[in-house]
Image (cartoon, rainbow, N blue to C red):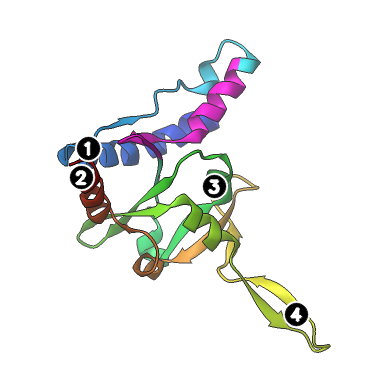
Amino acid sequence: MSFHQDRDLRGQPAEQILLELLRLQNIPARINPTPDPDIAPDPATRQQWYEDRAAYDLWVNGEYWDCKADWMSWQTGNICVEADSLVHTRSVKFAYILPNPSGLYVHVFDTKDLITLYNAQNRLPRGDGSFYPQYLYPHKRVGDQAENDAVLLPKDITNEFGRSLWQETREIIKQTA
């Protein structure tokens, strides 16, 4: 199985869950229809399909959204935000599906907020009176790819940034009414 197939097999259930939750609210949404790059007829098409697949996961009421599922967040207490997702996206929102003891919680972040949190730094003093930068949140290599950089945000960051899917859908419904 290729990397792209593995990625899609892991991501599709989360995308399907989000799609159905949006449809329950009568919000127009659809999954990115771009084909798997591994079946492209030539290298140029493969590259284009790869870029198009990485650009967004769902179209939601006229906006591109990415959908991520962090199945480990309940155990770790962190939300893993991968650098490549932020670099390659054209999405304005990221919906994170997070497990909890009673089911699944979906939290929606603005992409610009995730980029800010990824890059957030403190200035720490040195003994000579100068300062050096240190990331505010831990940065790690994650997953099964050697160069998969990510930031680990504490789950309680959801109290300060973004909003629940239900709050987000309520706003969408208000805007379209």
Q: Residue furthest right?
A: 128
Q: Which of marks 1 and 3 is in front?
A: 1
Residue 37 lies, in percent from the top left, at 53, 22
| Mark 1 to mark 3 CA distance (whole Å) | 25 Å
How far from the left and from the top, in percent, is residue 76?
42, 65
Residues at marks 3 and 2, CA–CA distance in whole angstroms: 27 Å
Task: Tell me which label, 1 or 3, sits earlier in the chain.
Answer: 1
Q: Mark 3 points at which residue?
A: 86
61 lies left or right of 115: left
Region of the chain picked out in magenta, as a range? 45-64
Q: Can residue 16 be seen in this view?
A: yes
Q: How far apart are marks 2 and 4 (CA)?
A: 47 Å
Query: Which residue is tagged 2?
Result: 173
Mark 3: few/some/many CA within 10 Å (<14, 14-19, 20+): many
Q: What residue type is labelled 3?
A: Leu
Task: Read off the residue under disc 1.
Answer: 27
In the rendered image, residue 31, in percent from the top left (x then y), is placed at: 34, 30
Q: What residue type is labelled 2?
A: Ile
Compute the Cα span from label 3 to label 4.
Answer: 28 Å
Residue matched to label 4: 131
Residue 56 falls within the magenta-colored stretch: yes
Decide which of tag 1 and tag 4 comes sooner along the chain. Answer: 1
Mark 1: few/some/many CA within 10 Å (<14, 14-19, 20+): some
Residue nearest the observer in this picture, 149 or 127:
127
Q: Where is residue 46 in the image (x, y as percent from the top left)?
A: 58, 20
Residue 64 placement: quadrant: top left
Asked whether disc 2 touches disc 1, contact meaning CB atoms under 8 Å apart, the reply is yes
